[in-house]
Image (cartoon, rainbow, N blue to C red):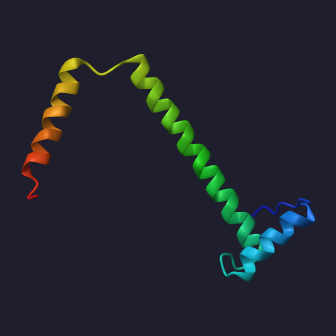
Amino acid sequence: MVQLVTRVSDELAAGVDELVDCGLASSRSDAVRSALERWIDSERRRRIGEAIVEGYQRIPQTDEELAWADSGAAAMIAEEPW
């Protein structure tokens, strides 16, 4: 396992300590690790979303595909017991 060492401001360290004190993280390392995992996951999801949008812009859905989706959604709503 790789160890990362960095310097942070006193304010940032105090904020991390608050997370630990509140029980949101078990340690400073846990708080930083969790934040990095979330940031990396968020960035990965953003890139995937952009790739999906780019794909639909490059090859848009046809009117036939859109009609099928609309009719399917309408049928599901009609089946609801409300």
Q: Position of residue 70 (x, y in %)?
A: 18, 33
What residue is shown at x 42% (from left), y 20% (from top)? Answer: 57
What residue is shown at x 37% (from left), y 18% (from top)? Answer: 59
Vertical position of residue 81 compared to residue 20: above or below: above
Vertical position of residue 79 compared to residue 20: above or below: above
- Residue 43 quadrant: top right
- Residue 19 quadrant: bottom right
Q: Nearer the viewer, residue 76 or 35?
A: 76
> Looking at the image, which residue sits at the far front?
82
What residue is shown at x 25% (from left), y 18% (from top)? Answer: 62
Left or right, 66 with reference to 20: left
Query: Which quarter of the rendering shows the C terminus?
Result: bottom left
- Residue 9 quadrant: bottom right
Left or right, 22 with reference to 45: right
Q: Nearer the viewer, residue 53 or 78?
A: 78
Q: Position of residue 35 (x, y in %)?
A: 69, 61
Query: Which quarter of the rendering shows the N terminus?
Result: bottom right
